[in-house]
Image (tube, coloured by chain):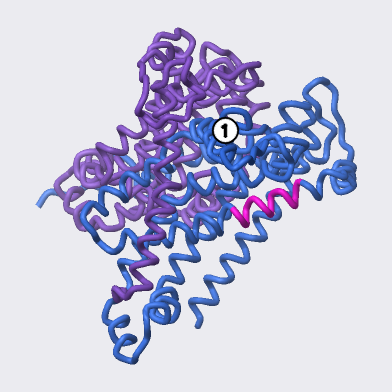
Amino acid sequence: MTNHQRPRGLTDPQAGFLLVIPGLAVFLAIIAYPFLNSVFMSFTDRNMMRQVWGFVGFENYVKVFKDIYFLDTLKNTAIFVVCATVLPFCLGLAWAVVLNQGFKGSEILRGVTLVNWIIPGTAIGFLWMWIFNGEYGVLNGILSSFGVKVNWLGAKGTAMMVVIIARTWQMLPWYMSFLLGGLQSVSLDVVEAARIDGANNWQAFTKVILPSMASIATVVLVLGIIGNLQHFDLPWVMVEGGPARATTTFSIEVYRTAFKNWNLGKAATIGTIWAVLLACFSFLYLKSIDRQDTD
Amino acid sequence: MFQKTKPFTAFVIIVSVILGIFIFFPLLWMINTAFKPAANTFDLYFFIGPLTLANFKRIVTDAQILTYLKNSLIVSFASSFMATFVSALAGYSLSKFRYRGRKIVMTMFMMSQAFPQAILLLSIYLMMKGFGLLGSYWALLLSYVTFTLPVGTWTLKSYFDQIPTALIESSKIDGAGFLRTMVQIIFPLAVPGMISIAIYGFVWSWNDLLYSLTLVTDSAKRTLAPGLLMTFVGEFTTNWGNMMAASIVVSVPVVLVFVFLQRYFIQGLTAGGVKG
């Protein structure tokens, strides 16, 4: 027998670590370091128009909380996140129920629906700006035959509504896709059993079908909320957070403070507060999953 | 699942009509507007009336827009390739190797999706500016890799988890080193997963606005999304016909990817989820 030598080269743990290095390097350079640096920056008066900067402690935080617009931003973000999550969720569920009927062409219809979700946010923004255009938009064109004409994107009261409608249109297919998968995995035997017990459609839906979709519904809602808390494209493309800050959410506010007003310290402060809110939410989500497991 | 009672049939019909109009009419109206001659842009006819290709001709012969298109293609292909490669290495490592710190790396990757992009952007901007990368493709390429990395690593890790470790062992016994085992035995088995991650990365990069708006200061390197925004928004009079044609042009590549690779696309969709 020849004496088997250990193969030359790396041990398994070394090889494993070597493979994860590129990913880890990107993560540290483009996510971890920027995050920590931005939190650090929130305690400075850094500004892109000046070279010199120094520590200011909690001054930025005091300023932001005293800022008369801060509550507005918080309110706008809350309205946007709640409406632009609940609306496409409900409509996506209704659309999933329709597509789940399995009529001829429902597969194709499902695919075509997804087109709305994959096209760029910039194009979606342009599209809805055009439909809601105050002068020549098709909606006002139809409404004007009833003598109604609304400056949808130019008025404080309606601009947020239009942005939410556009976001609903964009995200409906995404919710539909998940919820249709959820519907299809509901056990038909259990539904049948409920039927034999005399449940009608509505009772079967609320008492059997929805509860057995609870976990997928929770996941899409949480992912949807996280996505909406981050969302930038539509309010920026359509109205740049206006008119009069009516559609200014956290992401718009951070972007504008940093890259229009060049106030990095303040932008980092708003961003940090926002990240803390997001973290609280993720924590609640993890806890709710824990509770589901122990039940 | 549902009994076809009268109220249920009524529900299905009403929802089909209302949601059908809501979902499909806007896109049709965009296409409709793009095909209307400039003189008829504001007329409310629906395809039945004068139509023209003039808007598309103007968009695809515009040198500036062609530059944006070229940049978008370069950045999206390159970043999607890089992200898939890096994710595959990391996913394989986390699935089949055991070493100190593995758990920490996994937790970090999982959490990274919850960081608000805008706050990362502040420091990324300063960093790229410091390295003098704001006028090159690199600032965008590197940033886009991070969009896909967490989702990609997790998806591919679960792919590798399904591949029996015995396969690696037997390849080792046959004398193959770890690189050869990885490249010739294991990676080919995960190709479907890699394709769906590549698609995910491509669509993310193609559709991004926030990062490209900020990290590219040189108009010769600008991508389509911010390019179109700067071309059409903020002018005195908006040319809606051109704008709709441009929106279609920017949408066509991702729609094509979707149509031809739909199977993989749905996989990536259910794996990743969040789109900002």
In magenta, the rendered stretch is A73-83
What secondary structure is found at the residue carrying circle 1?
helix
Among the chains pictured, the one given purple colouring is B
Count of labels in the image: 1
Instruction: Judge whether residue A128 can be spotted in this image.
Output: no
Q: Is residue A78 magenta?
A: yes
Residue A254, position as x, y percentages in the image = 72, 37
Q: Residue at x 65, y 54 (%)?
A: A278
Q: Nearer the viewer, residue A38 or A95?
A: A95
Question: What amino acid type is highlighted by mark number 1?
Answer: Met
Letter of the chain that mark 1 sits on in the rendering: A
| Residue A268 occupies quadrant | top right
Q: Dividing the image into 4 quarters, which one contains the C terminus of chain B?
A: top right
Q: Residues within 10 Å of mark 1 (few under 14, many from 20)?
A: many
Q: Which residue is mark 1?
A: A129
Magenta stretch, main secondary structure class: helix
Query: Would residue B205 appear left or right of A272 to someone viewing this image?
Result: left
Q: Dividing the image into 4 quarters, which one contains the N terminus of chain B?
A: bottom left
Q: Nearer the viewer, residue A137 or B193?
A: A137
Above/below status of A60 relative to B215: below
The residue positioned farthest toward the left in the image shown? A1
Above/below status of B235 relative to A66: above
Q: Residue at x 71, y 27 (%)?
A: A259
| Residue B217 occupies quadrant | top right
Residue B112, position as x, y percentages in the image = 55, 48
Query: Would residue B259 appear left or right of B246 to someone viewing this image?
Result: left
| Residue A56 occupies quadrant | top right
Q: Nearer the viewer, residue A72 or B127?
A: A72
The residue positioned farthest toward the bottom in the image shown? A197
The colour chain A appears in is blue
Q: Residue at x 74, y 31 (%)?
A: A258
Residue A109, position as x, y percentages in the image = 30, 49
